[in-house]
Image (tube, grey):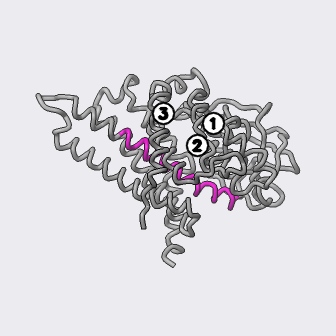
Amino acid sequence: MNFDFSSEDRMIQEQVRRFLSEQSPLSRHRSVMEGESLQASDVWQGLADLGLQGTAIPEAYGGVGAGYLPLCLVAQELGGVLAAVPFSSSVYLATEAITCFGSTDQKERYLPKLASGEWVGTLAVSEGPHAPSPTNLTVVRSGDRLSGKKLVVPHGLAADFAVVLVSSDAGTDLVLAGLEGVERSAVEIVDPSIAAATIDFAQTQCESLGEPGDGWAMLETVQHRAAVLYAFEQIGGAEQALNMAVAYAKERFAFGRPIGSFQSLKHMMADMYVALKLAESNAYYAAWALQNDAPDLGLAAATARVSATQAFQLCARDNIQVHGGMGFTWAFDCHLFYRRSNYLSLALGGLNEWENKLVDALPSAVA
């Protein structure tokens, strides 16, 4: 069985790479990170012009209908340039939730505007330092009104609406809530380009997404599907961090020779390469599982998520080490990848949580 991508998928990837190399250099990421704007709006609009937000959205709802394989490659390219746009929150999470569980009416209202980039969505889950669970949610739904606070909502400052995990009389629900007029405050996190926010719902109007009481199961489905796309974004970042390390090791001389010739750095970069390739192989299978809605998607997603998280964190950290004292400075770009790697390691729950998901999925896969 061939898990590689088709020539058509690779053509889309190359087109996205050319666009991002011209319009989204790391200097653009820095401008957003340093507070000049909430996101790189020109890059977001350019992605919309290419139809990328609607890559996996069916044509009937204004999308391209190309499926998840090209979307995975788009995620990889976005990860390589640390694109300061709400693509992950809006496409991997909010769009996926509505595509999977929205009614026909909700899909007709939301998906065309998500596909065009006119609307930005996000997923609001966290409420504190504890891991969310069906028993500890404090954001409450009563009828069609929502009350309570969600913390560290990714791209919450830029989003037009949120898919919100809430407690209700039925148990746990997912609801859709518009954010116009809702109180939002900025949250400082390791990667400021994410525009994270605390959102304070005060009798905010909402509507059900899917069946009441099924919110936790729906959340897990969305997170498993999003984990595959996040894994490709992490691979893109890890690959670029490795390339930076190799390039610097070739041009930096010490004691009359390139530092890349020293055995300790050779071993360090070899470990980076091995981790990246392992993550890549796991992600390729997960992409196939996502595209085909395979029975073992949960196991494939957890495997890709764990290996991609480990690879990006290793490559981002050791890239700083290869650059030595200069790697720790603000002027060099190493810390940008380190920041993003740490954010992405927690975006869907920490590494331990996904290792547990992987272990839990093994018995059913063996059976």
Pick whichever, 193 or 83, lies toward us. Answer: 83
Which of 52/354 is in front? 52
Q: CA distance from mark 1 to mark 3?
A: 20 Å
Q: Quadrant of residue 103?
A: bottom right
Mark seen at residue 155: 1
- Mark 2 residue type: Ser
| Mark with earlier residue (1, 3) | 3
Which residue occupies the foreground of this view, 225 or 353? 225
Residue of label 3: 20
N-terminal of the two: label 3 or label 2?
Answer: 3
Q: Residue at x 67, y 45 (%)?
A: 123
Is the residue marked by circle 1 packed among few (<14), some (14-19), or many (20+) residues within 10 Å? many
Label 2 neighbour load within 10 Å: few <14, some 14-19, many 20+: many
The magenta-colored residue range is: 216-241
| Left or right of 256, for residue 333 | right
Q: Tell me the amino acid under the disc marked 3.
A: Leu
- Tell me if label 1 and label 2 are in contact, CB under 8 Å: yes
Residue occupying the far bottom of the picture: 367
